[in-house]
Image (spheres, rainbow, N blue to C red):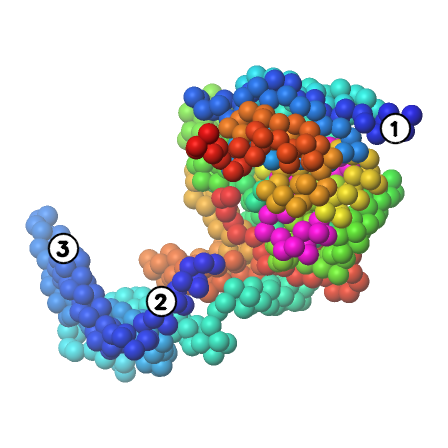
Amino acid sequence: MTDITHGRNARTADTGPAAPNAYVEAGKEAVYTAVLVFLLGFLMVGYQTQVLQGEQMSYVTRYSDVIWAMLLIPAGRFLLTLTRFDRTLPAVVLGGLGFVYLFGAGVIGVLELPIYGSLLVPVDTLQPHILPFEQPMVNVIFGLGALFVFASAARTRRRKTTGGQSIDIREAAEARQAKVARNLSSVLGPILIIAALVIPLTPWGDRKLVDSLVLVMTYVMLGWGLNIVVGLAGLLDLGYVAFYAVGAYTYAKLSTTLGFNFWESLPLAGAMAATFGLALGFPVLRLRGDYLAIVTLGFGEIIRIILINWQAFTGGPNGIGNIAKIDFFGIPFERNPAEGTTAFHTLFGLEFSTAHRVVFLYYVIIGLALITNFVTIRLRKMPIGRAWEALREDETACRALGINPTNTKLTAFAIGAMFAGFAGSFFATRQGFVSPESFTFIESAVILAIVVLGGMGSQVGVALAAILLIGLPEVLRELSLYRMLVFGGVMVLIMLLRPKGLLSYRVPTIQLHKGKPKTMAPPIVGAVK
Amino acid sequence: MSAAAATDTLLEVERLTMRFGGLIAINDVSFSARSRQITGVIGPNGAGKTTLFNCITGFYKPTVGRLLLRGAGGMPFMLERMDGFRIGQKAKVARTFQNIRLFPGMSVLENLMVAQHNKLMHASGWTVLGLLGLPSFRRAEAAARDLAIGWLERIKLTHVADEPAGSLPYGDQRRLEIARAMCTEPVLLCLDEPAAGLNPKESAELNALLLSIRDEFGIGLLLIEHDMSVVMGISDHIVVLDYGSKIADGSPLEIRNDPAVIRAYLGEDEKE
């Protein structure tokens, strides 16, 4: 908060009588930037190495790209510096135009829409183009850069018209944002649930879509589970996938050695994961913030490495196969069921279809996810839920009030882990095969990203973020190589524009005055106190 | 009988010493605090007042010494042997902090509900019965809410009950922190500079609040304070620390005229 007032003072000082000329300053900045771009980019961008036949190294020159970069990046720098001097109009106009042109044309190029090759840009020639860069994707990236210039200038403009951003105004803005998020959530929530329930029955609900949705729902459930640990209790957990793995392997072992079916092992998988949650909880009780994150990250890796190396029990890198597929509460989904049992399709008089199992899996994961959601919402209003949130806000004060921090943290870890265990055993029955490869650190990172991106405390936000984070890469598959690049760009943009998550707000767990519940600004993930 | 009860010894600090490496923050301090009394702890900066509080409330483990608390029903607690949070949970010692430590993102009412955690946790059957929505838990929750509302009325914050605690003005946050501590239903309330940063009017209101707590709840209050008008005005008994040692102990009038205290505060006359 102090840096904001400081920033404002600095700005008023700049525009004072002795202030340097904005254009001169911006020009200087631009020249520095151009030099930097040249130094950094000349060798790397200017010369592209190629391996020719006979393993000879060669290179092609790309001077035009270097020159364009040396023009565009300093231009952006120039506009941003002007923005700092409260001259926002050029940045808004040029940034906006630049975004529309570069991004639009770039996307057309990436998707290889017909007009790309003919009208706008001659693809296969070295003739001067209308677009700066040969590679369409590079244009898209520069377009996003232009968007950033535009957004920051537009924000400065808006701030100026509201008369400077004092702390009160910022708080009011946060409260307003939280209120919007809340209203949106209350509309979106039911829509999403109903949509999720009916999609397999609609004509669009083909097997491919439902299969993708099963994956998305798994992450929704994991996100909700991790939200208990990170969002409510404020314990930054980077090893959440370990509990997912424990759940998956518990079911895999129970199924392959003892012949348990999914429903029998579901509670056991949850209990096992919760036990591991406690086991992780004990050593990290004294740690907070970054240190906690590091240790949980290590725990996740330990579990994965044990899974790889304990050949005799876990099958090592080969994993465990032939895990029993899900059945309809004891009735198998098979074309030719074992003797003495009736298959699902004969029992209900249907034509056999592999889609039955997929659709059933889909409803199972929706059920599990909704249970997670419901329990989380209930728990928040219990004394333990309030203690979690209080612990997130101030652990010292909690101790002074006689709240046992050990038990409070351990329950958060255990309950969060339990839901991961349920999800894990679902994963195992869906795949029919588990191996350590499915439980790498990147999975933990994705789940945490879902919680952060969604906005803590917002169940709808987490669901939305899971759809975005898991669904977007599926949709973007068309972009092949650039998929993750666009994906990363979108995430950066979201965090720039909505640093507290897509739909983040907090509603008190108890209210004195009648009327619509108050909305509060949400907490920040992993804040260290 | 009531006269005898009024002067019950609540807390006995015996030969308390706290060392941090080579630094002796508290050196062989003994005093006692009684219930139905406000015991003021004063001293120049760095005298060890907050360290003393941290020892009593379990944030530090004393190096040497005994801290005996006679809890409800005369049950003795050895505070120096207890885990930090158990002092609040079992021995019923509550405290406030020099730099306010509310739960800023939670509402005012929630802050007071969190303070009743242990009681509610028990009533909710460690969450299991609460999740099932048993009526006994709902009754306990309603009672806790009533207690919180009573405190809100007393500190005149009912109208902002649903606002985030962090958004309140400073003086209100101070009073809320005291109310939150009182919601744990303590036998000893330790206040670390409650009047710091308050204007004279707020300070007077605070005095009235502390006196009403003493008289109505019959608990003991331990008070660190720099504001002499507060300390001298409401303390029944004052302990003076300087460089970690106790230099005086007595009624406000005695303390005011104690040469050692005057020396500690005003410095020694060089000519003598």
Disc 2 marks which residue? A10
Residue B25 can be seen in this image: yes
In the rendered view, would you say A472 is above or below A284? below
SS of the residue under disc 1: helix
Q: Are marks 3 and 1 on the same chain?
A: no
In the rendered view, would you say B109 is above or below A423? below
Residue A377, position as x, y percentages in the image: 69, 49
**Label 2 environment density (alpha carbons within 10 Å; few <14, some 14–19, many ≥20):** few
In the rendered view, would you say A135 is above or below B78? below
Q: Does the residue at mark 3 contact the one at mark 2 (Cβ under 8 Å)?
A: no
Q: Nearer the viewer, residue B30 or B270?
A: B270
Q: Nearer the viewer, residue A473 or B68?
A: B68
SS of the residue under disc 2: helix
Residue at x 79% of width, y 51% of height: B154
Residue A333 falls in image quadrant: top right
Tally of marks: 3
Q: Nearer the viewer, residue A72 or B169?
A: B169
SS of the residue under disc 3: strand
Disc 3 marks which residue? A50
Q: Mark 2: which amino acid?
A: Ala
Q: Nearer the viewer, mark 3 or mark 2?
A: 2
State how far apart marks 2 and 1 are (Cα): 65 Å
Q: Which residues are magenta?
A: B184-206
**Label 3 environment density (alpha carbons within 10 Å; few <14, some 14–19, many ≥20):** few
- Determine the chain carrying the residue at label 1: B
Disc 1 marks which residue? B3
Q: Is residue A494 left or right of residue B117?
A: left
